[in-house]
Image (cartoon, helix red, strand yellow):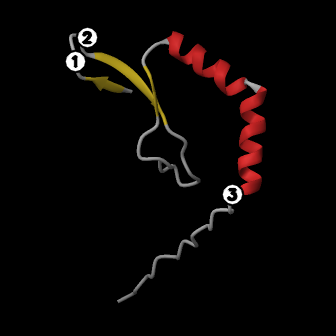
């Protein structure tokens, strides 16, 4: 949840930021999608559920190189 500052005559308001997390719980993006109302949520739901978007993203997946996953090293423990 974020408090949005006043902007061009509109008052301060609350918003929710959606940002996917990785296996460790860290955000995967610098900024997520900001939702300011339930109406915006409904509009995003319609866009995301559109079959054309799914088809387009599958085509992009097939053309894009696969991301290289970084291997996390175990922390070195030094016993004294």
The answer to the question of whether label 3 and label 1 lie on touching residues, with beta carbons closer than 8 A, is no
Is 18 located above or below residue 26 in the figure? Answer: above
| Residue assigned mark 2 | 10
Q: Is the C-beta separation of discs 2 and 3 under 8 Å?
A: no
Of the numbered discs 3 and 1, the one sitting upstream in the chain is: 1
With respect to residue 27, does 2 lie above or below?
Answer: above
- Give whichever of discs 2 and 3 has the lower sequence position: 2
Which residue is at 46% across, 13% downward? 37
**Residue 30 spot, x, y in % from top left:** 41, 46
Return the residue found at the far bottom. 80
Graded by Cα atoms within 10 Å as few (under 14), some (14 to 19) or many (20 or more), the crowding at tag 2 reads few
Q: Position of residue 64 (x, y in %)?
A: 68, 57
67 or 3: nearer the eye? 67
Q: Which residue is mark 1?
A: 6
Q: What separation in Å lies between label 3 and label 1 (alpha carbons)?
A: 40 Å
What residue did someone put label 3 on? 64
Mark toward the viewer: 2 or 3: 3
Q: In the rendered view, would you say 49 is above or below 56?
A: above
Q: Decide: marks 2, 1 in contact (CB < 8 A)? A: yes
Label 3 residue SS: loop
The quadrant of the rendering that contains the N terminus is top left
Q: Which mark is residue 73?
A: none
Q: Position of residue 48 (x, y in %)?
A: 67, 27
């Amino acid at each position: 949840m974020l408090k949005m500052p006043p902007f061009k005559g509109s008052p301060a308001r609350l918003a929710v930021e959606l940002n996917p997390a990785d296996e460790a719980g860290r955000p995967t993006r610098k900024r997520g999608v900001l939702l300011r109302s339930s109406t915006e949520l409904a509009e995003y739901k319609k866009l995301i559920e559109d079959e054309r978007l799914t088809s387009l993203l599958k085509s992009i997946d097939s053309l894009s190189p696969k991301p290289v996953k970084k291997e996390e090293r175990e922390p070195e423990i030094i016993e004294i």
